[in-house]
Image (spheres, grey):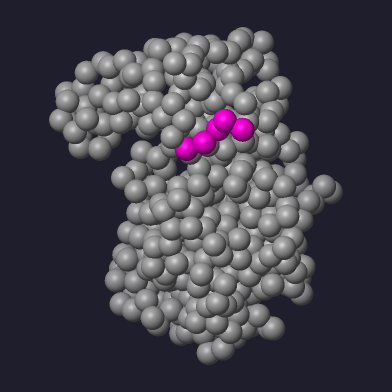
Amino acid sequence: MTKVFVAGVGFTKIAEHWDRGLDELMAEAALKALEDAGISSVNAIYVGNMLGEALQEQAHLGTLLAEDLGLVGVPAFRVEAAEASGAAAIYQGALDIASGKSETVLVVGGEKLSDGLGEEVSSALMMSGHQEYEGFIGADFYALNALLYRLYDKRYGAGGVAMFPVISHDHAVGVPHAQYPFKLTLEKVLSSPFIAEPLRRMEVSGIGDGAAAVVLIGERSAEKIKSPKTMLHISSSSDYITPFERENPLHFRALTMAVENVIREAKVERREINFIELHDASSIMAAISLESSGFAAPGEAGRLAEKGEFSLGGRIPCNTFGGLKARGHPVGATALYQVAEAHLQLTGRAGKNQVDSAKIGLVQSLGGVAATAFAILLRGV
Amino acid sequence: MRVPRYWRNIPFRYRLVGWRCNHCGTFHQEKPIICKRCRHRELYEVELPKTGKLVAYTIVQSTPKEFNLVSPYAIGLVELDDGTRILAQLTDFREDELREGLRVEAVFRKIRVDGEQGIIEYGYKFRPLIE
Protein backbone atom coordinates (compact mmCIF):
# COMPACT_ATOMS: atom_id res chain seq x y z
CA MET A 1 0.00 0.00 0.00
CA THR A 2 1.29 3.41 -0.90
CA LYS A 3 1.17 6.25 1.61
CA VAL A 4 -1.54 8.90 1.35
CA PHE A 5 -0.83 12.62 1.67
CA VAL A 6 -3.01 15.71 1.93
CA ALA A 7 -1.54 18.22 -0.51
CA GLY A 8 -4.16 20.96 -0.65
CA VAL A 9 -7.26 22.19 1.17
CA GLY A 10 -10.01 24.71 0.48
CA PHE A 11 -13.33 25.73 1.98
CA THR A 12 -16.11 28.28 1.87
CA LYS A 13 -17.37 30.30 4.78
CA ILE A 14 -20.18 28.50 6.58
CA ALA A 15 -23.34 30.58 6.52
CA GLU A 16 -26.90 30.58 5.28
CA HIS A 17 -25.94 31.11 1.64
CA TRP A 18 -29.39 32.02 0.28
CA ASP A 19 -27.92 33.28 -3.00
CA ARG A 20 -25.68 30.30 -3.75
CA GLY A 21 -26.41 26.69 -4.68
CA LEU A 22 -24.86 23.47 -3.36
CA ASP A 23 -22.97 22.94 -6.61
CA GLU A 24 -21.46 26.42 -6.56
CA LEU A 25 -20.29 26.05 -2.94
CA MET A 26 -18.67 22.71 -3.73
CA ALA A 27 -16.98 24.09 -6.85
CA GLU A 28 -15.53 27.01 -4.88
CA ALA A 29 -14.06 24.73 -2.20
CA ALA A 30 -12.74 22.29 -4.82
CA LEU A 31 -11.02 24.96 -6.90
CA LYS A 32 -9.41 26.46 -3.79
CA ALA A 33 -8.08 23.02 -2.80
CA LEU A 34 -6.69 22.37 -6.29
CA GLU A 35 -5.07 25.80 -6.25
CA ASP A 36 -3.58 25.14 -2.79
CA ALA A 37 -2.07 21.91 -4.14
CA GLY A 38 -0.93 23.64 -7.32
CA ILE A 39 -2.59 21.15 -9.68
CA SER A 40 -5.44 21.50 -12.17
CA SER A 41 -6.81 17.98 -12.51
CA VAL A 42 -7.08 14.70 -10.60
CA ASN A 43 -7.59 11.00 -11.33
CA ALA A 44 -10.84 10.74 -9.34
CA ILE A 45 -13.37 12.82 -7.41
CA TYR A 46 -15.34 11.75 -4.32
CA VAL A 47 -18.19 13.81 -2.92
CA GLY A 48 -19.40 13.57 0.69
CA ASN A 49 -23.01 14.71 1.13
CA MET A 50 -25.92 13.49 3.24
CA LEU A 51 -29.08 15.29 2.18
CA GLY A 52 -28.86 16.16 -1.51
CA GLU A 53 -31.92 14.06 -2.36
CA ALA A 54 -33.97 15.36 0.55
CA LEU A 55 -33.23 19.09 0.34
CA GLN A 56 -32.09 19.76 -3.25
CA GLU A 57 -33.86 16.79 -4.89
CA GLN A 58 -30.50 16.19 -6.51
CA ALA A 59 -28.59 12.91 -6.70
CA HIS A 60 -25.58 12.29 -8.96
CA LEU A 61 -23.50 14.92 -7.15
CA GLY A 62 -20.14 13.47 -8.24
CA THR A 63 -20.53 13.88 -11.95
CA LEU A 64 -22.36 17.18 -11.47
CA LEU A 65 -19.29 18.52 -9.65
CA ALA A 66 -16.87 17.15 -12.28
CA GLU A 67 -18.87 19.09 -14.86
CA ASP A 68 -18.84 22.29 -12.76
CA LEU A 69 -15.06 21.99 -12.41
CA GLY A 70 -14.51 21.51 -16.13
CA LEU A 71 -13.26 18.01 -15.37
CA VAL A 72 -15.71 15.95 -17.42
CA GLY A 73 -14.17 12.54 -17.98
CA VAL A 74 -12.83 12.16 -14.43
CA PRO A 75 -14.61 9.38 -12.50
CA ALA A 76 -16.71 11.08 -9.82
CA PHE A 77 -19.29 9.88 -7.34
CA ARG A 78 -20.91 10.61 -4.02
CA VAL A 79 -20.41 8.69 -0.75
CA GLU A 80 -22.94 8.71 2.10
CA ALA A 81 -22.68 7.78 5.79
CA ALA A 82 -25.12 10.22 7.45
CA GLU A 83 -23.33 13.10 9.22
CA ALA A 84 -20.02 11.30 8.62
CA SER A 85 -20.50 11.34 4.84
CA GLY A 86 -17.50 13.61 4.33
CA ALA A 87 -15.26 11.25 6.28
CA ALA A 88 -16.61 8.33 4.27
CA ALA A 89 -15.66 10.16 1.07
CA ILE A 90 -12.14 10.71 2.45
CA TYR A 91 -11.99 7.01 3.30
CA GLN A 92 -12.81 6.08 -0.29
CA GLY A 93 -10.36 8.63 -1.65
CA ALA A 94 -7.61 7.34 0.62
CA LEU A 95 -8.31 3.74 -0.42
CA ASP A 96 -8.16 4.80 -4.07
CA ILE A 97 -4.68 6.27 -3.55
CA ALA A 98 -3.48 3.46 -1.25
CA SER A 99 -4.51 0.82 -3.76
CA GLY A 100 -2.42 2.45 -6.46
CA LYS A 101 -5.44 2.91 -8.72
CA SER A 102 -5.27 6.72 -8.50
CA GLU A 103 -2.34 9.00 -7.85
CA THR A 104 -4.35 12.19 -7.23
CA VAL A 105 -7.86 12.42 -5.76
CA LEU A 106 -10.14 15.34 -4.97
CA VAL A 107 -12.50 14.83 -2.02
CA VAL A 108 -15.23 17.43 -1.61
CA GLY A 109 -17.86 17.64 1.13
CA GLY A 110 -20.88 19.85 0.60
CA GLU A 111 -24.19 20.45 2.30
CA LYS A 112 -26.82 23.12 1.94
CA LEU A 113 -29.27 22.92 4.80
CA SER A 114 -30.86 26.35 4.29
CA ASP A 115 -32.73 25.04 1.23
CA GLY A 116 -35.17 23.50 3.72
CA LEU A 117 -37.41 25.02 6.35
CA GLY A 118 -36.33 24.27 9.92
CA GLU A 119 -38.87 21.50 10.34
CA GLU A 120 -37.89 19.97 6.97
CA VAL A 121 -34.23 19.96 7.97
CA SER A 122 -35.07 18.35 11.33
CA SER A 123 -37.06 15.75 9.45
CA ALA A 124 -34.31 15.09 6.88
CA LEU A 125 -31.65 14.78 9.59
CA MET A 126 -33.71 12.00 11.19
CA MET A 127 -32.59 9.85 8.28
CA SER A 128 -29.40 9.16 10.24
CA GLY A 129 -31.50 7.28 12.80
CA HIS A 130 -33.51 4.12 12.30
CA GLN A 131 -36.56 5.48 10.50
CA GLU A 132 -38.87 2.47 10.99
CA TYR A 133 -38.39 2.67 14.74
CA GLU A 134 -36.93 5.95 16.05
CA GLY A 135 -38.14 8.07 13.15
CA PHE A 136 -41.70 6.78 13.26
CA ILE A 137 -42.22 8.00 16.82
CA GLY A 138 -40.20 11.23 16.48
CA ALA A 139 -37.17 10.17 18.53
CA ASP A 140 -34.86 12.54 16.68
CA PHE A 141 -31.18 13.32 17.19
CA TYR A 142 -31.88 15.82 19.97
CA ALA A 143 -34.19 13.41 21.80
CA LEU A 144 -31.58 10.63 21.71
CA ASN A 145 -28.89 13.04 22.91
CA ALA A 146 -31.14 14.25 25.71
CA LEU A 147 -31.75 10.68 26.91
CA LEU A 148 -28.00 9.99 26.82
CA TYR A 149 -27.43 13.19 28.80
CA ARG A 150 -29.89 11.98 31.49
CA LEU A 151 -28.18 8.59 31.76
CA TYR A 152 -24.75 10.27 31.86
CA ASP A 153 -25.88 12.67 34.59
CA LYS A 154 -27.27 9.81 36.67
CA ARG A 155 -24.13 7.71 36.35
CA TYR A 156 -21.40 10.35 36.60
CA GLY A 157 -22.94 13.78 37.12
CA ALA A 158 -22.95 16.02 34.05
CA GLY A 159 -21.01 18.90 35.62
CA GLY A 160 -18.76 20.64 33.11
CA VAL A 161 -20.30 19.07 30.01
CA ALA A 162 -21.81 22.44 29.06
CA MET A 163 -18.26 23.83 28.81
CA PHE A 164 -17.73 22.23 25.41
CA PRO A 165 -19.74 24.84 23.45
CA VAL A 166 -17.94 27.57 25.42
CA ILE A 167 -14.54 26.20 24.36
CA SER A 168 -15.59 25.85 20.72
CA HIS A 169 -16.88 29.43 20.60
CA ASP A 170 -13.71 30.76 22.27
CA HIS A 171 -11.68 29.18 19.48
CA ALA A 172 -13.95 30.44 16.67
CA VAL A 173 -13.45 34.12 17.51
CA GLY A 174 -11.85 35.80 14.50
CA VAL A 175 -12.02 32.67 12.30
CA PRO A 176 -13.13 33.96 8.86
CA HIS A 177 -14.85 30.74 7.76
CA ALA A 178 -16.72 30.17 11.05
CA GLN A 179 -20.49 30.55 11.09
CA TYR A 180 -20.64 31.77 14.71
CA PRO A 181 -17.30 33.53 15.39
CA PHE A 182 -18.21 34.99 18.77
CA LYS A 183 -17.71 34.15 22.43
CA LEU A 184 -20.40 32.29 24.33
CA THR A 185 -20.35 32.34 28.11
CA LEU A 186 -21.27 29.36 30.26
CA GLU A 187 -24.08 31.48 31.74
CA LYS A 188 -25.54 31.99 28.26
CA VAL A 189 -25.33 28.27 27.51
CA LEU A 190 -27.05 27.39 30.77
CA SER A 191 -29.76 30.02 30.36
CA SER A 192 -30.62 29.10 26.75
CA PRO A 193 -33.94 27.27 26.33
CA PHE A 194 -34.13 23.49 26.26
CA ILE A 195 -34.16 21.90 22.82
CA ALA A 196 -34.84 18.56 24.51
CA GLU A 197 -34.42 18.69 28.27
CA PRO A 198 -31.73 18.54 29.70
CA LEU A 199 -30.04 19.46 26.40
CA ARG A 200 -30.07 23.20 25.74
CA ARG A 201 -30.16 25.02 22.42
CA MET A 202 -26.68 26.44 22.92
CA GLU A 203 -25.30 22.93 23.46
CA VAL A 204 -26.05 21.75 19.91
CA SER A 205 -24.69 22.73 16.52
CA GLY A 206 -26.72 25.00 14.24
CA ILE A 207 -27.92 24.86 10.66
CA GLY A 208 -25.63 26.12 7.91
CA ASP A 209 -24.37 25.71 4.36
CA GLY A 210 -20.81 25.09 3.34
CA ALA A 211 -18.35 23.06 1.34
CA ALA A 212 -14.77 22.01 1.99
CA ALA A 213 -12.28 20.00 -0.04
CA VAL A 214 -8.95 18.23 0.22
CA VAL A 215 -6.56 16.99 -2.45
CA LEU A 216 -5.10 13.55 -1.64
CA ILE A 217 -2.00 12.30 -3.43
CA GLY A 218 0.21 9.20 -3.45
CA GLU A 219 3.93 8.86 -2.78
CA ARG A 220 5.07 9.32 -6.38
CA SER A 221 3.18 12.60 -6.73
CA ALA A 222 4.46 13.77 -3.35
CA GLU A 223 7.89 14.15 -4.91
CA LYS A 224 6.56 16.40 -7.68
CA ILE A 225 3.86 18.41 -5.88
CA LYS A 226 5.59 21.08 -3.82
CA SER A 227 2.71 22.35 -1.66
CA PRO A 228 2.84 21.80 2.14
CA LYS A 229 1.83 18.20 2.88
CA THR A 230 0.63 16.01 5.73
CA MET A 231 0.36 12.23 5.87
CA LEU A 232 -3.14 10.81 6.36
CA HIS A 233 -4.35 7.61 8.05
CA ILE A 234 -8.04 6.77 8.35
CA SER A 235 -10.04 4.06 10.08
CA SER A 236 -13.74 3.44 10.64
CA SER A 237 -16.14 1.27 12.61
CA SER A 238 -19.89 0.84 13.07
CA ASP A 239 -22.29 0.27 15.98
CA TYR A 240 -26.01 -0.36 16.57
CA ILE A 241 -27.88 2.65 15.19
CA THR A 242 -30.07 3.11 18.28
CA PRO A 243 -27.72 3.92 21.18
CA PHE A 244 -30.03 2.19 23.67
CA GLU A 245 -29.51 -1.14 21.93
CA ARG A 246 -25.81 -1.01 22.81
CA GLU A 247 -24.53 -2.72 25.95
CA ASN A 248 -23.31 0.64 27.24
CA PRO A 249 -24.96 3.63 25.57
CA LEU A 250 -22.52 5.96 27.32
CA HIS A 251 -19.59 4.46 25.46
CA PHE A 252 -19.09 5.08 21.71
CA ARG A 253 -17.57 1.72 20.87
CA ALA A 254 -17.33 2.47 17.15
CA LEU A 255 -15.21 5.51 17.94
CA THR A 256 -13.01 3.51 20.32
CA MET A 257 -12.38 0.96 17.59
CA ALA A 258 -11.71 3.56 14.89
CA VAL A 259 -9.26 5.51 17.07
CA GLU A 260 -7.43 2.41 18.28
CA ASN A 261 -7.09 1.15 14.73
CA VAL A 262 -5.86 4.43 13.31
CA ILE A 263 -3.21 5.03 15.97
CA ARG A 264 -2.00 1.45 15.58
CA GLU A 265 -1.83 1.85 11.81
CA ALA A 266 0.03 5.16 12.13
CA LYS A 267 2.29 3.68 14.85
CA VAL A 268 1.76 6.59 17.25
CA GLU A 269 0.85 6.80 20.92
CA ARG A 270 -2.16 8.73 22.24
CA ARG A 271 0.11 11.10 24.17
CA GLU A 272 1.86 12.11 20.92
CA ILE A 273 -1.39 13.58 19.57
CA ASN A 274 -1.22 17.39 19.85
CA PHE A 275 -4.86 18.33 19.16
CA ILE A 276 -8.26 16.81 18.34
CA GLU A 277 -11.04 17.96 16.05
CA LEU A 278 -14.10 16.50 17.83
CA HIS A 279 -17.58 15.77 16.52
CA ASP A 280 -19.33 18.14 18.94
CA ALA A 281 -22.78 18.01 17.35
CA SER A 282 -23.85 18.23 21.00
CA SER A 283 -22.00 18.91 24.24
CA ILE A 284 -22.74 15.43 25.54
CA MET A 285 -21.40 13.81 22.37
CA ALA A 286 -18.17 15.82 22.74
CA ALA A 287 -17.77 14.55 26.31
CA ILE A 288 -18.54 10.91 25.52
CA SER A 289 -16.28 11.08 22.44
CA LEU A 290 -13.26 12.16 24.48
CA GLU A 291 -13.95 9.45 27.03
CA SER A 292 -14.53 6.74 24.42
CA SER A 293 -11.35 7.59 22.55
CA GLY A 294 -9.17 7.42 25.65
CA PHE A 295 -8.48 11.13 26.27
CA ALA A 296 -10.56 11.34 29.45
CA ALA A 297 -11.69 8.74 31.99
CA PRO A 298 -15.42 7.89 31.89
CA GLY A 299 -17.37 10.73 33.49
CA GLU A 300 -14.34 13.05 33.63
CA ALA A 301 -14.47 14.96 30.31
CA GLY A 302 -16.57 17.84 31.65
CA ARG A 303 -14.36 18.36 34.67
CA LEU A 304 -11.22 18.34 32.47
CA ALA A 305 -12.94 20.86 30.16
CA GLU A 306 -13.54 23.14 33.14
CA LYS A 307 -9.84 22.96 33.98
CA GLY A 308 -8.94 24.17 30.48
CA GLU A 309 -7.31 20.96 29.29
CA PHE A 310 -9.15 21.07 25.93
CA SER A 311 -8.69 24.80 25.27
CA LEU A 312 -5.97 26.27 23.05
CA GLY A 313 -2.86 26.27 25.24
CA GLY A 314 -4.22 23.36 27.31
CA ARG A 315 -3.09 19.73 27.51
CA ILE A 316 -4.81 18.67 24.31
CA PRO A 317 -6.70 21.46 22.52
CA CYS A 318 -9.97 20.46 20.86
CA ASN A 319 -11.88 22.12 18.02
CA THR A 320 -9.12 24.58 17.29
CA PHE A 321 -11.21 26.60 14.80
CA GLY A 322 -14.52 26.28 16.63
CA GLY A 323 -15.66 22.72 15.95
CA LEU A 324 -19.16 21.81 14.83
CA LYS A 325 -20.73 24.14 17.36
CA ALA A 326 -19.08 27.42 16.37
CA ARG A 327 -17.27 26.93 13.06
CA GLY A 328 -20.44 25.21 11.89
CA HIS A 329 -21.80 21.80 10.92
CA PRO A 330 -22.91 21.53 7.28
CA VAL A 331 -23.19 17.79 7.85
CA GLY A 332 -21.68 16.11 4.78
CA ALA A 333 -19.00 18.81 4.56
CA THR A 334 -17.99 18.80 8.23
CA ALA A 335 -15.27 16.15 8.14
CA LEU A 336 -13.63 17.95 5.22
CA TYR A 337 -13.52 21.16 7.28
CA GLN A 338 -12.03 19.20 10.18
CA VAL A 339 -9.31 17.66 8.01
CA ALA A 340 -8.59 20.96 6.26
CA GLU A 341 -8.20 22.70 9.64
CA ALA A 342 -5.95 19.92 10.97
CA HIS A 343 -3.86 20.24 7.81
CA LEU A 344 -3.51 24.01 8.37
CA GLN A 345 -2.39 23.34 11.96
CA LEU A 346 0.24 20.81 10.89
CA THR A 347 1.59 22.96 8.08
CA GLY A 348 1.95 25.99 10.38
CA ARG A 349 -0.81 27.99 8.67
CA ALA A 350 -3.36 28.22 11.50
CA GLY A 351 -2.64 31.87 12.33
CA LYS A 352 -3.78 32.94 15.80
CA ASN A 353 -5.31 29.48 16.32
CA GLN A 354 -1.98 27.75 15.82
CA VAL A 355 -1.22 24.89 18.25
CA ASP A 356 2.46 25.32 19.11
CA SER A 357 4.75 22.81 17.40
CA ALA A 358 1.81 20.63 16.37
CA LYS A 359 3.00 17.42 14.71
CA ILE A 360 0.04 15.05 14.95
CA GLY A 361 -3.68 15.82 14.88
CA LEU A 362 -6.70 13.54 15.29
CA VAL A 363 -10.04 14.12 13.56
CA GLN A 364 -13.20 12.34 14.73
CA SER A 365 -16.33 12.19 12.61
CA LEU A 366 -19.57 10.51 13.68
CA GLY A 367 -22.72 9.47 11.85
CA GLY A 368 -25.93 9.52 13.90
CA VAL A 369 -25.25 9.05 17.61
CA ALA A 370 -21.85 7.49 16.87
CA ALA A 371 -23.34 4.58 14.95
CA THR A 372 -20.70 5.28 12.33
CA ALA A 373 -17.31 6.51 13.46
CA PHE A 374 -14.25 7.63 11.58
CA ALA A 375 -10.86 8.46 13.04
CA ILE A 376 -8.45 10.33 10.81
CA LEU A 377 -4.88 10.92 11.89
CA LEU A 378 -2.79 13.60 10.20
CA ARG A 379 0.91 13.93 10.69
CA GLY A 380 3.24 16.70 9.56
CA VAL A 381 5.95 15.64 7.11
CA MET B 1 -44.26 7.45 4.47
CA ARG B 2 -45.72 5.19 1.79
CA VAL B 3 -48.59 2.99 2.87
CA PRO B 4 -46.85 -0.38 2.28
CA ARG B 5 -43.91 0.73 4.41
CA TYR B 6 -46.22 1.66 7.26
CA TRP B 7 -48.24 -1.52 6.82
CA ARG B 8 -45.20 -3.83 6.90
CA ASN B 9 -44.45 -2.96 10.53
CA ILE B 10 -47.96 -2.87 11.94
CA PRO B 11 -47.40 -5.80 14.34
CA PHE B 12 -44.73 -3.87 16.23
CA ARG B 13 -46.36 -0.47 15.88
CA TYR B 14 -49.78 -1.65 17.13
CA ARG B 15 -49.04 -4.48 19.55
CA LEU B 16 -45.27 -4.48 20.29
CA VAL B 17 -44.92 -7.78 18.45
CA GLY B 18 -41.40 -8.50 17.26
CA TRP B 19 -38.78 -11.22 17.09
CA ARG B 20 -36.50 -12.50 19.83
CA CYS B 21 -33.34 -14.50 19.27
CA ASN B 22 -33.56 -17.99 20.71
CA HIS B 23 -29.84 -17.97 21.46
CA CYS B 24 -28.96 -14.55 22.97
CA GLY B 25 -32.42 -13.10 23.62
CA THR B 26 -31.97 -9.90 21.59
CA PHE B 27 -35.26 -8.31 20.56
CA HIS B 28 -35.81 -7.14 16.97
CA GLN B 29 -38.66 -4.83 15.97
CA GLU B 30 -38.65 -6.11 12.42
CA LYS B 31 -38.35 -9.74 11.35
CA PRO B 32 -34.65 -10.33 10.75
CA ILE B 33 -33.04 -13.09 8.73
CA ILE B 34 -30.24 -13.36 11.26
CA CYS B 35 -29.83 -12.10 14.84
CA LYS B 36 -28.11 -8.71 14.81
CA ARG B 37 -26.12 -9.50 17.95
CA CYS B 38 -25.09 -13.16 17.78
CA ARG B 39 -25.92 -14.06 14.14
CA HIS B 40 -28.05 -17.08 15.08
CA ARG B 41 -30.92 -17.82 12.74
CA GLU B 42 -33.49 -19.16 15.20
CA LEU B 43 -35.83 -16.38 16.20
CA TYR B 44 -39.35 -16.58 17.57
CA GLU B 45 -42.23 -14.17 17.46
CA VAL B 46 -42.88 -12.45 20.77
CA GLU B 47 -45.36 -9.92 22.10
CA LEU B 48 -43.63 -7.61 24.56
CA PRO B 49 -45.21 -6.88 27.94
CA LYS B 50 -47.32 -3.72 27.94
CA THR B 51 -46.09 -2.36 31.25
CA GLY B 52 -42.73 -1.19 32.49
CA LYS B 53 -40.93 1.73 34.03
CA LEU B 54 -39.52 4.98 32.72
CA VAL B 55 -35.71 4.99 32.59
CA ALA B 56 -35.29 8.49 31.12
CA TYR B 57 -37.43 11.03 29.31
CA THR B 58 -37.24 14.32 27.43
CA ILE B 59 -39.57 16.88 25.88
CA VAL B 60 -38.68 17.51 22.23
CA GLN B 61 -39.04 21.20 21.39
CA SER B 62 -37.61 21.41 17.88
CA THR B 63 -39.81 19.03 16.01
CA PRO B 64 -39.51 17.37 12.61
CA LYS B 65 -42.25 18.27 10.12
CA GLU B 66 -44.13 14.99 10.64
CA PHE B 67 -44.78 16.04 14.24
CA ASN B 68 -45.32 19.78 14.08
CA LEU B 69 -48.99 19.42 14.99
CA VAL B 70 -48.17 17.65 18.25
CA SER B 71 -45.14 19.75 19.21
CA PRO B 72 -43.77 19.68 21.85
CA TYR B 73 -43.97 15.99 22.66
CA ALA B 74 -42.29 13.65 25.12
CA ILE B 75 -39.96 10.77 24.30
CA GLY B 76 -39.15 8.16 26.91
CA LEU B 77 -36.78 5.25 27.25
CA VAL B 78 -38.96 2.54 28.79
CA GLU B 79 -37.77 -0.66 30.43
CA LEU B 80 -40.55 -3.23 30.04
CA ASP B 81 -41.31 -5.82 32.69
CA ASP B 82 -39.22 -8.43 30.83
CA GLY B 83 -36.19 -6.10 30.74
CA THR B 84 -36.50 -5.08 27.07
CA ARG B 85 -35.80 -1.36 26.59
CA ILE B 86 -37.74 0.54 23.94
CA LEU B 87 -38.17 4.14 22.88
CA ALA B 88 -41.69 5.54 22.96
CA GLN B 89 -43.69 8.71 22.89
CA LEU B 90 -45.30 9.43 26.24
CA THR B 91 -48.90 10.59 26.53
CA ASP B 92 -51.69 11.33 29.03
CA PHE B 93 -49.30 12.66 31.67
CA ARG B 94 -48.98 15.76 33.78
CA GLU B 95 -45.53 17.18 33.26
CA ASP B 96 -44.83 17.19 36.99
CA GLU B 97 -45.35 13.45 37.28
CA LEU B 98 -42.65 12.45 34.78
CA ARG B 99 -39.71 10.96 36.68
CA GLU B 100 -37.28 8.12 36.51
CA GLY B 101 -38.86 4.89 37.70
CA LEU B 102 -42.46 5.94 36.91
CA ARG B 103 -44.61 2.87 36.11
CA VAL B 104 -46.01 3.16 32.59
CA GLU B 105 -48.28 1.18 30.28
CA ALA B 106 -48.64 0.94 26.51
CA VAL B 107 -51.69 2.43 24.81
CA PHE B 108 -52.80 2.54 21.17
CA ARG B 109 -52.69 6.05 19.77
CA LYS B 110 -52.58 8.15 16.63
CA ILE B 111 -48.90 8.85 15.95
CA ARG B 112 -49.01 11.19 12.95
CA VAL B 113 -50.75 12.10 9.73
CA ASP B 114 -48.84 11.59 6.51
CA GLY B 115 -48.55 15.02 4.93
CA GLU B 116 -48.97 14.10 1.29
CA GLN B 117 -51.66 11.45 1.40
CA GLY B 118 -53.32 12.32 4.68
CA ILE B 119 -53.02 8.73 5.89
CA ILE B 120 -53.42 8.52 9.66
CA GLU B 121 -50.65 6.39 11.14
CA TYR B 122 -51.25 4.66 14.48
CA GLY B 123 -48.92 3.06 16.96
CA TYR B 124 -48.00 2.60 20.59
CA LYS B 125 -47.37 5.28 23.17
CA PHE B 126 -46.84 4.90 26.91
CA ARG B 127 -48.73 6.63 29.70
CA PRO B 128 -48.47 6.57 33.49
CA LEU B 129 -49.90 3.27 34.72
CA ILE B 130 -53.25 3.61 36.40
CA GLU B 131 -53.17 0.94 39.13
Of A154 and A78, which appears nearest the observer? A154
In the image, residue A280 lies at what x, y percent?
A: 56, 59
Q: Quadrant of residue B118?
A: top right
Is residue A67 highlighted in magenta?
no
Using the rendered image of the protein, determine whether residue A220 is visible from the camera's viewpoint.
no
Q: Is residue A158 left or right of residue A121?
A: left
Of B66 and A234, the residue lying toward us: B66
Q: Quadrant of the N terminus of chain A?
A: bottom left
Residue extending furthest toward the bottom: A357
- Could you tell whether A271 is left or right of A28 in the image? left
| Magenta-colored span | B96-100
Taking the spot 22% from the left edge, 18% from the top edge, the residue there is B44
Determine whether A378 is above or below A89 in the image: below
Q: Disc count in the image?
A: 0
Height in image: B17 above or below A270?
above
**Can the viewer see residue B102?**
yes
Between B45 and B1, the one nearer to me in the picture: B45
Type of secondary structure dominating the magenta stretch? loop
Up the image or down, B28 lies above or below A63; here it is above
Measuring from the top left, give residue A255's x and y in whole percent: 39, 58
Could you say where residue A359 lies in the image, as x and y percent from the top left?
Answer: 47, 84
Instruction: Say which residue appears at 57% left-offset and 77% top-offset.
Output: A308
Q: Residue at horizontal 52%, vertical 21%?
A: B127
- Please report the residue visible at 47 percent of the width from the left and 19 percent of the height from the top: B129
